[in-house]
Image (tube, rainbow, N blue to C red):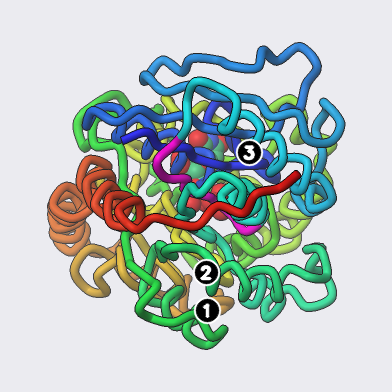
Amino acid sequence: MRIAMISEHASPLAVLGGEDAGGQNTHVAELSAALVAAGHDVRVYTRRDAVDLPVTVPAPDGYDVVHVPAGPAEPVAKDALLPHMAEFGTWLAERWRTGDWQPEVVHAHFWMSGLAALAAGRRTGVPVVQTFHALGTVKRRHQGAQDTSPPGRLGHERQLGRKVARVVAQCQDEVAELARMGVPRSRMTVIPSGVNLSTFAPLGPAVERDGDRPRILTVGRLVERKGFEDVIRAIAGVPDAECVVVGGPPAGLLETDPYALRLRALAESCGVADRVKLIGAVPREEMGRWYRSADALVAAPWYEPFGLTPLEAMACGVPVIGSAVGGLIDTVVDGRTGDLVPPRDPRALGAAIRRLLGNRIRRFAYATAAVERARGCYSWSTTADRLAEVYGEVAAVRRPTRVVA
Ligand code: UDP
């Protein structure tokens, strides 16, 4: 099939770890690669955020990345992109109407991409599949006044849920949220993200360790809701273990990053500054070396739409201690591939870490089961096949085209 992916702020070519570059970038890159490997023709449309970007860049995995002129050709924070989505949609519609390539289906990632995709879809008759990756209701609930999303986000997401041809949710928790928003269950299909099983495998090089200290690893964009503060507090109750934090700005910029400085100050006040190491952003191809160096991955988000890092760790044979939220409830099998604890509870987290680090047999059993689960249930080729089925279903239903002068 000819498939258009829309990922307005998250380019599959971006460097990861920064504030707005994480799971969605990985998801779009890996999914597009897997669809190409299955014989599909894929183009990814993302916003042009630098003047020197060519319109089309062929990605090494066989799909094209198309840079859409919408708003200034410079980095713009994700939450400030809404005013440019109409321009994005108009450009897509023009391109598909007048160019030599028209998609049979468009898959939008994140709500703002959905708005552009729906606008283009209405004018060209191309059906829209929507994956939200994150929901405004959840963000508002957890971040309250600190939520910088545009004011109309919740309404837009509700409308999108009702207007697109299909919503692809990534976990059961998201289905429940969407249902509460009024999205009909008949429009939803649950298809989880996958994990790259060649990049993330138990065998392979690992980053060197600091002597005999047990190592816990925690990974993600350096934002508050990822729960790094809870991990540092928890580590204070785990004698001797070191805590390695991967993600955030590149290593050279950590010294001036306000959140990195806050984490350092917290480690200092908890008396664990010598056991907490901030590494900064690590290239995607090096992530496996970091996972393999750890005794356990700790993922302590307040909330998590899906959470690729626990799955990547599992595929590397690393047990996960995680918050019982969002996608982790589906991916981590409590008591079999890892332990789930309540979110925002450093005491419970510390107890779980202590228990696991103190029990080699349990770690081995979790590691074995984790690899098996990642391989058996979460390959990108399975995700791509299941999505291709959905694409085929929605493309088979002809949609009326609204003629715009
Ligand atoms: N990642 C990376 N380098 C880093 C930090 C993270 O390549 O320094 C990758 C990580 O391997 C994962 C993604 O970024 O593929 C983060 O996805 P996740 O779903 O865990 O979190 P999100 O960023 O979507 O909130």
| Residue 70 drawn at (x, y percent) | 78, 35
Q: Which residue is mark 3?
A: 93
Instruction: Identify the residue shown where x is 52% and y is 88%.
Output: 180
Amino acid type at image mark 3: Ala
| Residue 108 drawn at (x, y percent) | 53, 50
Task: Name the image quarter holding the C terminus.
Answer: top right
Please give left or right for residue 233 compared with residue 369 in the image: right
108 in the magenta segment: yes
Q: Are marks 2 and 3 in contact (CB under 8 Å)?
A: no
Q: Which residue is mark 2?
A: 237
Instruction: Identify the residue shown where x is 27% and y is 50%.
Output: 392
Q: Which residue is mark 1?
A: 347
Packing grade of label 2 (10 A; few <14, some 14-19, many >=20) is some
269 in the magenta segment: no
Amino acid type at image mark 1: Arg
Q: Is residue 294 above or below residue 352?
A: above
Q: Nearer the viewer, residue 328 or 217?
A: 328
